[in-house]
Image (tube, grey):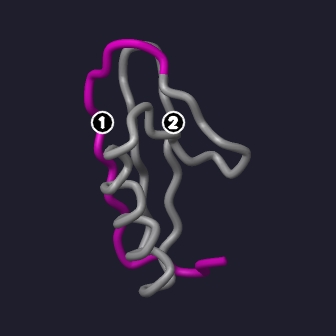
Amino acid sequence: MISVPGIMIEITNPCAGTVRFNEHGLPVAGEKSHGLGVRSIMAFCEKYGAVCQFEQRGEYFRLQLIL
């Protein structure tokens, strides 16, 4: 757990359709060659001790990352 966050990044994008999430709350790629961005973000979080959360609210997809 992060006791004193240094920075929070929030990115919100419009999206068409419904995003599927796995049991860990990560978005599931719909096509074989997709999902590289999520894997890169997870590798960054692991390397630097950051935490992130993905969610869909209505027609928007949001990533929150705390470092």
- Upstream in the sequence, badge 2 or badge 1? 1
| Residue indicated by mark 2 | 55
User: What is the magenta range?
Assistant: 1-18
Looking at the image, is 31 positioned above or below residue 6? above
User: Does the magenta-highlighted stretch encompass residue 16?
Assistant: yes
Looking at the image, is 19 positioned above or below residue 39? above
Name the outermost residue toward the right: 23
Residue at horizontal 44 percent and vertical 86 percent from the top: 47
| Numbered mark located on residue 12 in the image | 1
Q: Secondary structure at mark 1?
A: strand
Label 2 packing within 10 angstroms: few (<14), some (14-19), many (20+): some
Residue at horizontal 38 percent and vertical 49 percent from the top: 35
Q: Nearer the viewer, residue 10 or 37?
A: 37
Residue at horizontal 38 percent and vertical 78 percent from the top: 6
In terms of secondary structure, what is the magenta stretch mainly? Answer: loop
- Which quarter shows the C terminus? bottom left
Left or right placement of residue 14 versus residue 4 in this view: left
Left or right placement of residue 18 versus residue 15 in this view: right
Residue at horizontal 56 percent and vertical 48 percent from the top: 26
Amino acid under label 1?
Thr
